[in-house]
Each structure stands twice: as C-alpha cells, then as structure tokens.
Image (spheres, rainbow, N blue to C red):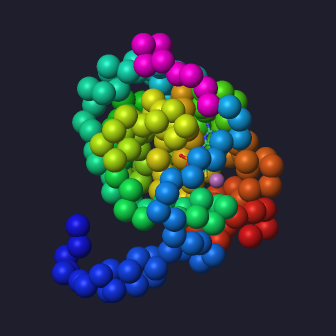
C-alpha cells in the first residue's frame, strides 16, 4: 500500500525507478526451471533444516502450515533480466523456522526436491528477508513455480529462491550451489548487477 495517492502516470514512473539496472518489467510470470518439474506430494513433503552440528529438525506439511503465516508483498528480479513488481505470497519466515534450531552457522546451502541447490549467507536468510512460501496471489503455489513450497529471497536474483524446497544445510563455510558452480555470481545482488563470476 502506498502512503501517497498518485496518478497513474506517477505510479508508472515510480515503478520504473525501483527496477534494478539492466532489468525490464514484465506483467506475466515466466517459468524458469533447469529440469523437469518434480511431483511433490504434501502427504509426504518434509522440510528439514540440518545444523552445522549435524542435528536435523524436520517439519511435515501440517506442522509447516501451523506456523505463523506472513504475507510478503515484494518485487522479484530474474538474472535473465525480467522483473515483476508487487507480487504477493504467503508463507513462513525463515526466522520463525530457525528459532527452533540451535545454530551459529554463517552460510546455508538450500536443497530442492530434484537436484537443484543454491547457497546464501545466513545474514540474507534471517532478519525478515526470506520465507518458505506456499501461496502466490492467494492461490496454492503452482507446481511449475515451485509448489508445494519454495524459498523466497526477493532481495537477491530469483535463482536464489529455490523451487520445490526440501531442506537447508547450515554450514560454517560457503559452498556454491547449482548455478553458482556454473558461472553465476556467488551472492547475486540485483542492485549491484552481480549476475556472473567477476561481476
Ligand atoms: N529447484 C529449482 N529452483 C529454481 C530453479 C530451478 O531450476 N530449480 N530456477 C531458478 C531460477 S533461475 C529462477 S529465475 C526462478 C524462477 O522461478 P519461476 O519459474 O517461478 O519464475 O526459480 C529459481 N529456482
Ligand atoms: Mo533465473
């Protein structure tokens, strides 16, 4: 919600100025997947956070839904240059899940059903910046967009937002994931255009 009542023209230019460099605005929702869409059933879905000690904490689908639900309203930015503004999601903050985990880790490696992985500093998964989401625009998250549940870390390029998320390993060292090993930037800040190695 905007604090200001602006005309249409004013809203348009305000949207354009919040696009990171090199990005264009899209109204549709492109699907970008490195492989086939895995079929993940909520009856067998388990989400596991494994601490650097090796201790694992897991939640079933009903346990996950019982956590406090948040409603992030945010822009998303894909490294292939599309951005989408004002998307609505429903899910559980990583802060909420990590409150149940004994950890002092600095890094995280996120795992998906299927083979996908991606890495993030713990700093970027905490502090109200990351969620495991299961609804998009008030509907169950479609399988092609990562349903039943995906990571949402909107302040980094969207490849960090792992679809069909299965778990997170907390680490005391940085371990690159799928795209990071293939030439994408280790961190991926869209505002600094950190697309590829060396950016
Ligand atoms: N498991 C998994 N997660 C993934 C991907 C993938 O191929 N597999 N692609 C990433 C990339 S590159 C992007 S841009 C977004 C795309 O999400 P979307 O298909 O919902 O737009 O998901 C990210 N998460
Ligand atoms: Mo992407």
Q: x, y (%) of residue 36?
A: 68, 31
Image: magenta residue range = 37-44
Q: Is residue 115 rendered to the left or right of residue 2?
A: right
Nearest the camera: 60 or 126?
60
163 over 137 or under it: above or below: above
Q: Is residue 168 rendered to the left or right of residue 129?
A: right
* Residue that appears at 38% across and 80% down: 12
* Residue that appears at 57% across and 41% down: 162
* Residue that appears at 52% across and 41% down: 145
Nearest the camera: 178 or 98?
178
- Quarter-of-image position of residue 86: bottom left
- Quarter-of-image position of residue 191: bottom right
Q: Is residue 83 visible?
A: yes
Q: Is residue 102 visible?
A: no
- Quarter-of-image position of residue 33: top right
Q: x, y (%) of residue 107?
A: 59, 45
In the image, farthest residue toward the top: 43
Quarter of the image with the C terminus in it: bottom right
100 over 30 or under it: above or below: above
* Main SS category, magenta section: loop
* Residue that appears at 26% across and 26% down: 66
Q: x, y (%) of residue 50?
A: 54, 27
Query: Quick check: is 62 in the magenta stretch?
Result: no
Nearest the camera: 36 or 120?
36
Count the marks: how many?
0
Quarter of the image with the N terminus in it: bottom left
Q: x, y (%) of residue 176?
A: 72, 45
Q: Is residue 197 rendered to the left or right of residue 193?
A: right
């Amino acid at each position: 919600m905007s604090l200001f009542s602006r005309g249409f023209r004013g809203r348009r230019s305000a949207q354009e100025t919040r696009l990171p460099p090199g990005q264009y605005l899209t109204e549709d929702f492109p699907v970008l997947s490195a492989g086939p869409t895995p079929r993940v059933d909520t009856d067998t879905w388990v989400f596991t956070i494994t601490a650097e000690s090796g201790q694992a904490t897991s939640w079933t689908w009903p346990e996950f839904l019982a956590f406090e639900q948040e409603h992030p309203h945010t822009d998303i930015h894909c490294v292939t240059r599309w951005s989408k503004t004002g998307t609505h999601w429903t899910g559980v903050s990583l802060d909420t899940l990590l409150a149940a985990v004994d950890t002092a880790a600095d890094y995280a490696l996120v795992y998906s059903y299927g083979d996908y992985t991606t890495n993030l500093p713990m700093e970027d998964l905490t502090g109200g910046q990351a969620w495991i989401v299961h609804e998009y625009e008030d509907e169950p998250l479609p399988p092609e967009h990562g349903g039943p549940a995906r990571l949402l870390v909107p302040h980094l390029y969207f490849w960090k937002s792992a679809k069909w998320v299965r778990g997170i390993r907390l680490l005391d060292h940085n371990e690159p994931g799928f795209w990071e090993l293939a030439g994408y930037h280790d961190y991926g800040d869209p505002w600094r255009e950190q697309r590829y190695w060396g950016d």
